[in-house]
Image: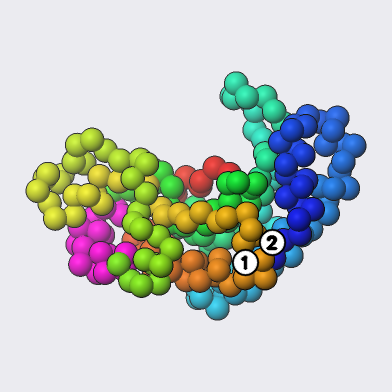
């Protein structure tokens, strides 16, 4: 579970998103980050029991957590800090291009997610081919009770209007072949984040995602070169 002070810090940062306030309250940030790292350590230990690939990858929590500083170089929003803590658990850590598991911690915006976000065209073609060849097992995976308990289906946020090149509109797998990302997410209420049930809930959701993550990484062979999700 997380401490209420961690959420208080994020709320205050949202109101006072500037370097002067952050520097004056750096101790609050350090305390909040330490609290999050403690949770991530628990989650990583549990995830190693769920996903053999994670267990063999020798991840550290510091390689999973995202920096709180925003990249504002090409953004019209020049606020310097994110108002969330984000962590990406995957083979090789957040800088490694592979499917994985994501946790977002944010006041009124926390969620669990996993899969692969916006892979490049070569990787996308490979995944589509694997889905086309293995549609029955792919659909069975997405209808499994462990997945269905937390995720309705894959996200339809990024989808083609027309069938991708090489596929017909009447292909039985067309609803998945038109996807440009292969992700699923589940919201987390603020109350759960400070509950002793937090880690267990997140790990159960990650367990539901594990077959999808494994499928995507198997489809890529050596994990390909997809784009990592933003945080």
Quarter occupied by the N terminus: bottom right
Residue 217 in picture, x, y percent from top left: 41, 62
Residue that protrudes farthest toward the front in the picture: 191
Residue 227 in picture, x, y percent from top left: 47, 45
Mark sitting on residue 172: none
Q: Residue at x 86, y 30 (%)?
A: 20
Residue on which the image places disc 2: 194
Q: Residue at x 33, y 45 (%)?
A: 156
Q: Residue at x 77, y 47 (%)?
A: 8
Locate residue 82 relative to residue 49 in the image: left or right: right
Locate residue 36 relative to residue 217 in the image: left or right: right
Residue that protrudes farthest toward the bottom in the picture: 49
Res 46 visible:
yes
Locate residue 74 relative to residue 159 in the image: left or right: right
Q: Are marks 1 and 2 in contact (CB under 8 Å)?
A: yes
Q: CA distance from mark 1 to mark 2?
A: 7 Å
Locate residue 50 relative to residue 198 in the image: left or right: left
Residue 181 in picture, x, y percent from top left: 37, 47
Q: Quadrant of residue 195?
A: bottom right
Q: Nearer the viewer, residue 25 or 218?
A: 25
Residue on which the image places disc 1: 198
Residue 180 highlighted magenta (yes or no): no
Residue 162 in picture, x, y percent from top left: 19, 36
Residue that protrudes farthest toward the top in the picture: 76
Q: Which residues are magenta?
A: 126-142
Q: Residue at x 12, y 51 (%)?
A: 171
């Amino acid at each position: 579970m997380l401490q209420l002070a961690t959420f208080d810090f994020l709320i205050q940062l949202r109101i006072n998103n500037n370097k002067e306030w952050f520097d004056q309250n750096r101790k609050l940030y350090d305390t909040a980050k330490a609290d999050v790292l403690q949770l991530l350590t628990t989650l990583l230990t549990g995830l190693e029991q769920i996903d053999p690939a994670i267990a063999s990858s020798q991840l550290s929590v510091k390689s999973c957590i995202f920096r709180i500083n925003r990249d504002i170089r090409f953004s019209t929003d020049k606020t310097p800090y994110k108002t969330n803590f984000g962590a990406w658990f995957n083979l090789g850590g957040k800088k490694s291009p592979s499917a994985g598991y994501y946790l977002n911690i944010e006041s009124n915006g926390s969620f669990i997610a996993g899969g692969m976000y916006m892979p490049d065209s070569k990787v996308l073609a490979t995944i589509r081919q694997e889905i086309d060849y293995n549609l029955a097992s792919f659909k069975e995976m997405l209808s499994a009770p462990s997945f269905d308990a937390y995720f309705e289906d894959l996200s339809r946020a990024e989808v083609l209007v027309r069938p991708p090149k090489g596929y017909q509109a009447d292909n039985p797998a067309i609803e998945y072949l038109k996807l440009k990302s292969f992700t699923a997410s589940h919201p987390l209420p603020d109350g759960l984040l400070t509950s002793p049930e937090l880690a267990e809930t997140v790990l159960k959701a990650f367990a539901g995602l594990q077959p999808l993550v494994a499928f995507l990484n198997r489809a890529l062979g050596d994990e390909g070169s997809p784009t990592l999700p933003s945080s």
